[in-house]
Amino acid sequence: MPRSALVAPGPALSAAERTRHARHLLLPGVGEEGQRRLANARVLLVGAGGLGSPAALYLAAAGVGTLTIVDDDLVDLTNLQRQILHGERDVGRRKVDSARDAVSRIAGATTVHTVDRRLDESSVLPLVADHDLVIDGADNFPTRALVSRACALLAVPHVWASVHRFDAQASVWWAGEGPCYHCVFPQQPSPDQVPSCAVGGVLGATVGAIGSVLAVEAIKLIVGLGEPLIGRLLVHDGLAQTWDTLTVRADPDCRVCGSEADPTAPLSGGTAEPVPAAYRPGEGVAPEDLAGLLEGGATLIDVREPGEREIVTIPGAIPLPLAAVLAGAPVPPGVLVVHCKSGGRSARAVATLRARGVDARNLDGGILAWVARIRPEESTY
Ligand SMILES: [Zn+2]
């Protein structure tokens, strides 16, 4: 039984619009009325990265009327392997600008709004409330938590996917209609438990495949077609090339959408990366001070993964993965300076080591800051 359409039809199509969307007009269940619904739709796209790229391009090509693109990042050379909204000429530009240009090239009729900042407690609710549905292509857990809670609170459909290496998952979370994201994933993994694309690697084409699924689900919801992934988790194994769906159910005790949920609780509550109590920014070591400390006898510990060390290392650093530090592995005596990619994982290591009485200090900004300020000729990731 098809669901009712999420969006009311817009005005009648012009002759040119009918021609442009002729292949949609022929589709059972879409037709001119479905195309008018797409033209009237307002979609919020969080993240103009790997997942957001195909979603944005296909939604624009499909004739979605309004697309709001949120991203606070700049296009980096390492993005181009999968983020097909951006090209080589866009490196260094704001992603929202590059994305707007790419969408405009495909569909001049699509109105693009851009938001060049990270969403926070005050901005996320009005933004979500102003759209028919949200496509979540966020690359960080705090933003994902904010978006998912805002969608649940406002009962706005939350079209979601997650990719790791060759594998992906997708679903449509929709409080009241099925589970919300937190019903199924009540505990947010910490960043060191789930490697990001930068740490674990990711196949660009797999991101493209699952990003296209996001566009399909959004179009189905807008037009009222088929069976959206509400209450189902799509699980894709890219190496085995399998696509399975698991049934997932709303949790009556969900702390976000359950009957006992506190609608006044902070949207980001408990899901952001915890800042260890024993570490405060500013107590760390600036990249400029590292060489002096090492000459004075300090030892440099690199808590990153082996694949990261193949890209760039700081001379003299001793590899000791974060998991080993957290498990209590022995460390050299004396002052330790600990580094990771950008300072998050090493802050956890420092907190653990300090709790053991070790004089450990964090390299502020990680190896990325060290490369930027000391060795700009080195590779980054
Ligand atoms: Zn829930």
Image (cartoon, rainbow, N blue to C red):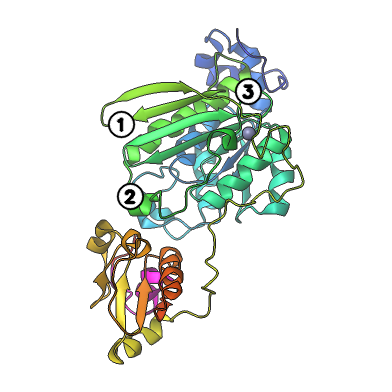
Against 275, is 243 above or below? above
Q: What amino acid does circle 3 point to?
A: Ile
Residue 37 % position (x, y): 66, 21
Task: Tell me the residue that label 3 is attached to.
Answer: 222
Task: Tell me the residue that label 1 is attached to.
Answer: 238
Q: Are marks 2 and 3 in contact (CB under 8 Å)?
A: no
Q: Label 1 vs label 3: CA separation?
A: 28 Å
Q: What amino acid does circle 2 point to?
A: Gly
Q: Residue at x 54, y 60 (%)?
A: 274
Q: Specify the quadrant that holds the N terminus.
A: top right
Task: First in sequence, mark 1 or 3: give its number.
Answer: 3
Task: Tell me the residue that label 2 is attached to.
Answer: 200
Q: What amino acid does circle 1 point to?
A: Gly
Ligand 1 within 8 Å of disc 1? The answer is: no
Camera-nearest residue between 48 and 369 = 369
Against 193, is 234 above or below? above
Q: Which contiguous range is marked in magenta?
A: 364-378
- In the picture, measured across the screen, residue 88 lies left or right of residue 60, that is left
Residue ranking furthest to the bottom: 296
Residue 86 % position (x, y): 43, 48
For mark 1, give the secondary structure: loop
Camera-nearest residue between 39 and 83 = 83
For mark 3, give the secondary structure: helix
Does the stretch in magenta take in 41?
A: no
Question: Tag 3: Cα neighbours inside 10 Å, few (<14), some, or many (≥20)?
Answer: many
Against 75, is 11 above or below? above
Task: First in sequence, mark 2 or 3: give its number.
Answer: 2
Does the stretch in magenta take in 374?
A: yes
